[in-house]
Image (cartoon, rainbow, N blue to C red):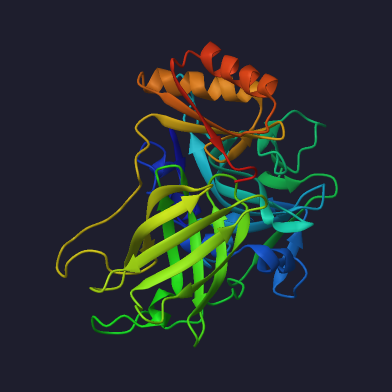
Amino acid sequence: MCCVRISRVSLAVWVGFVLGASSASTRGDEFDRIEGDTLALVLKTNEATTHKRLSINQIHALPNIFADARSAFLVARTDQGNVARLLVAPAFRKQPSGQGKPIPVLVLERFDTFESGNLSTRLARGKDILLFEGFSFDLDSGQVVPEGQGGDLKFESVKEGPGLLALGSAAIGTLNKAPATPKIPAAGPSPGRTVLPGDYAGRYRLFANGQWSGTLDLIVDSQGKVSGRFRSDLNGTSYEVEGQVDRESPPKAQFAIRFPRTRQEYEGLIWTEGKGAMAGTMRMLGRPYGFFSIREGGRFAPEGEEVSLGEIPKNGQHTVWLSQGKIRLDGQLTTEPALAETLHKALENEPATSVLVQAPTEEPFATIHKVLNVIKEAGISSIRLEPTAPEL
């Protein structure tokens, strides 16, 4: 892309970074916690300042409100009344010819848009989207759009300099500090190797059968009753969790994730050493699968060992999910033309690219067949079709 992000560095030394490497991306775990009611109320509090336009200088001057992200945090209300969270960074991009002055751009490092009437539903998400001067972005669909086609934000240059403009009824909000988020009522797992019911409480990254993943928040009361939420990476929707820690055998717990038309039922054992991970079996529609989960901030390797999960490589594997005519590629809402273009580019970068297509059994065959043809026309020869639960 030949652009350099310039968040949180002096304006005077921007150009000095144009030919260098961009800063390492951050995980943004604190960013992920700003969701639901917390996100919806941000623009309604006295702690937020609403803007119709933010100059690059203003974006640069915003305080770091997250310990794990150096980019500017913004909250936006879209023209459809939905709410979005963003991490943005000004940047310079070299001219394609390598000659002339670099041009200013804005990088949407991460964004998530949630439905105003159902805050557990994520409408769109994305990362590392580059906005050139004059580009408009529709947060509701997660796409760059032409002028007058529903854009919420626009990167523009005026006499005073480049900046980010909120279009129409959309608005941009900034904060001086991170909003308070709900806390999982647990100080962490108990010391020693004895497992107590409360040791299951916490936030986990959950992975099941290589098909399902997401963030799992568990709360355990004094009687061992389990409650919480699971936010799916596939579609961004949040689902209720309920269950019980086995009182006779505390290392074991059962809990279920309730989807609209089915349930995933888990039985897991927490690791006694460090209590930083949990693994076991999951059943859905009568079929057993394996799962594991890693506690946020927990220890899952022997003391003294330097082990990091890092980013889990996909090795050219992509998932297309269909439900009620909607298409998601790796969890992001998309269209047939965009699907074809993205997969074609993926194939150019990785000749072994393969696609898993998941769809509920009641999805019309015509819809599935049409999407399969789109994938084939993109050049993908390795395609696997698998039934799944609706809205999963």
Q: Quadrant of the N terminus?
A: top left
Residue 284 x/y as whole percent: 51, 49
Q: 133 left or right of 287?
A: right
Q: Nearer the viewer, residue 197 or 311?
A: 197
Q: Indicate the quadrant where residue 231 lies.
A: bottom right
Residue 134 seen by the camera: no
Q: Is residue 94 above or below residue 73?
A: above
Residue found at the very far bottom of the displayed protein:
222
Instruction: Give whichever of 276, 303 is nearer the camera.
Output: 276
In the image, is residue 314 above or below residue 146? below
Q: Is residue 242 left or right of residue 290?
A: right
| Vertical arrangement, residue 306 with respect to residue 138, above or below | below
Q: Residue at x 52, y 70 (%)?
A: 243
Total marks drawn?
Answer: 0
Tell me what residue is drawn at x 46 percent, y 56 percent.
Answer: 10
**Quadrant of residue 194 in the image?**
bottom left
The residue lying furthest to the left in this view is 304
> What x and y, as percent, mark residue 279?
34, 60
Is residue 43 in sight in this rendering? yes
Asked which quadrant contains residue 63, the reply is bottom right
Q: Position of residue 176 (x, y in %)?
A: 61, 71
Horizontal and vertical percent position of residue 60: 56, 56
